[in-house]
Amino acid sequence: MLPRRSTVLRCFVLGAASVIVLVWVICADHRETSDGVAVSTAVKSQLSRDFSKLQFQYGGDSPLIPSVDLKNMSLLDLLMRVLDMSQHRPKNPHSFRYVVNAISVCSRDVFLLVYVHSSPSHFKQRMAIRQTWGNAKNFPDVVIKVIFLCGIVPTSENLSVQDALSLEADYYNDIVQEDFVDTYRNLTYKGILGLKWVSAHCRHAEFLLKSDDDIFINMFSLVTHLQKISSQRGKPVRELLLCHVWYGWKVMRDPRSKRYLSPSEFADDVVPVYCSGSSFIMTPDVAVAMYNASFRVPFFWIDDVYVTGMLAREVGVTQTHFDSAYMLFPEEFLQKFTERNLSSKLVVGHIDSINSLKIVWNKVLANRRHPNETIDITTKGP
């Protein structure tokens, strides 16, 4: 089938314009007169501004864009770079800037980096995680680091939340925040933020764990399992995406549903295979590859489907089953995680309250100190 006449005309005009600009720049780059110097300077200034705009569309400080010395770059080289970036403009630009950034968290070797999706106002949830399963002091033999990812507070909420979050970040140095609005429909931006941050600051970690702030992680069981994987596969472990895998999830067409998708948003009736967004484990090479792929794959607002389904498919990573380690029903969390035959096998649990999280954490600690001891699950945590 031949291309449409309008398409051919558009391509011809674009090509002709590029040739004209290229010839003009080459001429400007070689003029010796004062007028020529002025033209050359003006053109370079405009191209530098164009480069900066394109760089922002590529994610600002994205590792995809190497640092360049614009002052010492010739007009021709600068033009070619701008044209190349324009031609390969991202389908899903992540053009947000850091508000808060804990860049020193991964300054040394890390066995496991945990990044937790959290709402700016969830101060209690973050503190509960720091006091329980996210407390690295419980693991003196391995290096575990925890960060919390946030967007900015919607304008409809109390802006004092941002001031409190900034104080929290200064004190704990474990908050990473970008300037997208933190809403349900923007969760994919938070997912890409995690991939971006790992790519820039922690790609040397052995393993990564993504979690939500309403999730409990039995870190002792998880670390044991990851150490076993490391010993079996050898270091470094690569191409690992370990999770509760969802198959054949049908698209919700009911407009009353929270996850409603119109045909214009998603044409197929079934989404790709993907991981439960509650928590999943991967290796940094997977995170870096998926971050790079996020510029090629158009935005989709359901974050777990986009990150662990669409991006994983784009980079050719297969989800590895870890289903038996998950308990995703909050009403059964307390019961299942305190049953002697199950508690040591379960790793990920969806909590219904902070109190339940602390009760189960006390149970985990008690079982490690006294394997035969029982605990009253109605006892409140500290």
Image: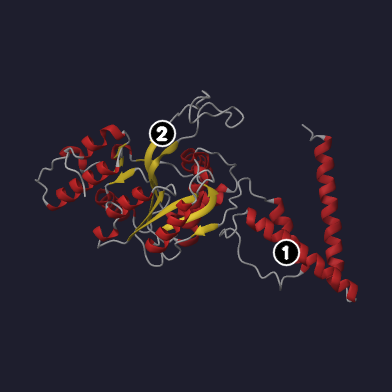
Q: Residue at x 66, y 70 (%)?
A: 69
Number of dots carrying numbers: 2
Residue 265 seen: yes
Residue 273 place in picture, x, y as percent: 46, 35
Instruction: Name the residue carrying label 1.
Output: 48
Q: Is residue 181 above or below residue 352?
A: below
| Local SS, label 2 | strand
| Local SS, label 1 | helix
As shown in the figure, which amino acid type bears the numbered disc 1? Ser
Residue 277 place in picture, x, y as percent: 42, 40
Position of the N terminus by quadrant: top right
Quadrant of the rendered structure where residue 106 is?
bottom left
Instruction: Name the residue carrying label 2.
Output: 246
Quadrant of the rendered structure where residue 263 is?
top right
Quadrant of the rendered structure where residue 236 is?
bottom left
Residue 286 seen: no
Q: Residue lying at the far left in this picture: please name it.
A: 372
Q: Residue at x 58, y 58 (%)?
A: 64
Frontmost residue, 183 versus 166: 166
Q: Residue at x 65, y 68 (%)?
A: 68
Mark nearer the N terminus (1 vs 2): 1
Q: State left or right for residue 30 relative to residue 86.
A: right
Q: State left or right for residue 290 relative to residue 371.
A: right
Q: Residue at x 67, y 51 (%)?
A: 88
Q: Is residue 247 above or below residue 69?
A: above
Frontmost residue, 169 versus 84: 169
Residue 257's disc is none
Residue 335 place in picture, x, y as percent: 21, 35
As shown in the figure, which amino acid type bears the numbered disc 2? Trp
Q: Is residue 263 above or below residue 218?
A: above
Q: State left or right for residue 55 relative to residue 8.
A: left
